[in-house]
Structures are given as structure tokens and as C-alpha cells.
Amino acid sequence: MMVTLDIARPTRRSVVASERRFFLGMAIAIAVTVIFGFTLNAARMHWTFLELPAQVHLHAAVFST
């Protein structure tokens, strides 16, 4: 008796695993981009933290959470 495998058709588990890897990679790329962007802006220091209006502090608190 000969057993054959259909290697051209991926299993459901491998599809889910590859999707999870893709979305994890995209989440990491987005987080790195955002952190890098804010770091560059903070490094320039063209503003003082206490001089910023309350809306900016509220925005930062909401989007940081």
C-alpha cells in the first residue's frame, strides 16, 4: 500500500501560523515606526513639556494607552 501526501495544499494550521507571523511582524513594524518618530521629535526639543496645552497632554495619554 502506497501513501501519498498532497504537499501543494497547505494545512489550516500552517495558514493560521503564517497569518499570525505576518500580523505580529506588522505590529512590531508599526510600533517601531511610531516610537522612532516620537523619539526624533522629542530629541529636537523645540518645545517645553509644560508649555504644551492640555489637549496635547490628553491626546498623548489617550493614545499611549
Image (cartoon, rainbow, N blue to C red):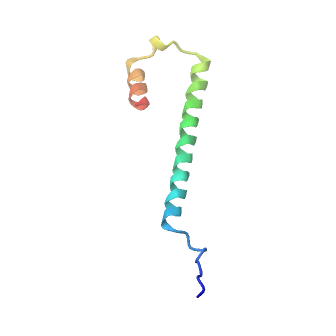
Q: Residue at x 42, y 31 (%)?
A: 63
Q: Residue at x 38, y 18 (%)?
A: 54
Farthest front residue in view: 1
Decide: is 54 above or below 14.
above
52 lies left or right of 30:
left
Nearer to us in this view, 53 or 61: 61
- 10 or 32, which lies in front? 10
Between residue 21 and residue 42, name the one nearer to us.
21
- Quarter of the image holding residue 6? bottom right
Does residue 8 sit above or below 49 in this rendering?
below
Report the quarter where the C terminus lies. top left
At x 56%, y 47%, the residue is 25
- In this image, 23 relative to 2: left or right? left
| Residue 33 in the image, given as x and y percentages of width and height | 58, 36
The quarter holding residue 53 reads top left
Q: Measured from the top left, where is residue 58 in percent x and y?
A: 38, 24
Say which of 9 and 28 sits in front: 9
Quadrant showing the N terminus: bottom right
* Number of residue marks: 0
Quarter where residue 10 is shown: bottom right
* Residue furthest to the bottom: 1
Residue at image x 43%, y 29%?
64
